[in-house]
Amino acid sequence: MSEEVKLMKGNEAIAHAAIRCGCDGYFGYPITPQSEVMETLMEVEPWKETGMVVLQAESEVSSINMVYGGAATGKKVMTSSSSPGVSLMQEGISYLAGAELPALIVNVMRGGPGLGTIQPSQSDYFQTTKGGGHGDYRLIALAPASVQEMADFVGLAFDLAFKYRNPAIILADGVIGQMMEKVVLPDYKPRRTDEEIEKQCPWAATGRKMSRKNNIITSLELKPEVMEQNNLRFQAKYKQIEENEVRYEEILCDDAEYLLVAFGCSARICQKACEMAREEGIKLGLLRPITLWPFPTKVIANYANKVKAMLSVELNAGQMVEDVRLAVNGKVPVEHYGRLGGIVFTPDEIVNAVKTKLM
């Protein structure tokens, strides 16, 4: 059977992929530029076909706590929002990580700080990769650069979240969320039965009698020595994720003398910049982190032995550049180029930045 190609926005692709991946529940609250996720789910009405719950909560705080409750029962649940809304969710996200619950959060970034602008940005990198909430925790973070990846990463994020019992986030930007492209949606995967959930998630608090075991879901531990052991277990899990789940893409890197590092929509623009630079005889390559955490630190460190300099290209004031500099450890110069306020740079600007900052 030939694949069915559809034309849709990135936000719409998230919604359709969630249904097809067997999502049990979506809890969210509208905010630009991601509102089409919930709007699409409401329009499609998956509860009639699959039984998937779709609920507009009264706030982002409510929605993330509904996700916590659904995840505690082993269900495949998610939410989506944009930057200010995700800020409101930070306590709940920390609770999910502390209780080791799998869940999916989608952040389609807009400019800030504060209410900022509804225009696209990539300024939530720190919030996502450094832990926007309290405590020593990590989120598995995937950064899509196309509508196709918006669809593909829903299933991947759920798989990783359940594999490691850890919340995962799709960190998109307003460009990818709002742009329209051709996409092939994933095959339908039926929602799991209660029996399958109990078998796959023996830790879940299902309330059923099959296991004859009362599971308690909590992130609270009053004994310091026990809490320390919990945290050490978390850190061991994070190390395992760092060893096994790094994802990235290399473009025109084989003979590169200068390297761009960019994610999301910035990487798309950088790819064109690389082509333009090479037409001028500048050997420019692109390293695109797909997982922002775990970050491709070792890969970037290896390129520090091959290139003359690197440029971290981001729609922010300079956030990922810190991780690039840590990876390089002073071996080659690392500069930053970005635009703020919702302004998206052009390939020409990036080529000029390479010439002025690196050469």
Image (cartoon, helix red, strand yellow):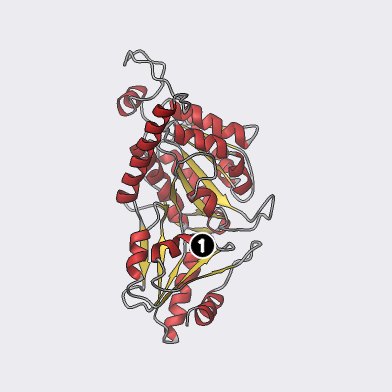
The residue that mark 1 highlights is 265
* Tag 1 secondary structure: helix
- Tag count in the figure? 1
Q: In this orientation, which residue lies closer to the viewer: 239 or 30?
A: 239
Residue type at numbered disc 1: Cys
On screen, residue 301 versus residue 116, left or right, reads left
Q: Quadrant of residue 188?
A: top left
**Residue 144 visible to an observer of this rendering:** yes
- Name the residue located 39 percent from the left edge and 44 percent from the top edge: 155
Q: Is residue 225 above or below residue 125?
A: above
Q: Is residue 13 visible?
A: no
Indicate the position of residue 20 as horizontal and vertical percent values: 41, 40
Q: Is residue 182 above or below residue 153?
A: below
Residue 163 position within the rendered picture, expressed as x and y whole percent measured from the top left: 33, 38
Residue at image coords 30%, 25%? 199
Q: Position of residue 149 (x, y in %)?
A: 43, 54
Crowding around mark 1 (Cα neighbors within 10 Å: few <14, some 14 to 19, many 20+) is many
Residue 307, percent from left and from top: 37, 76
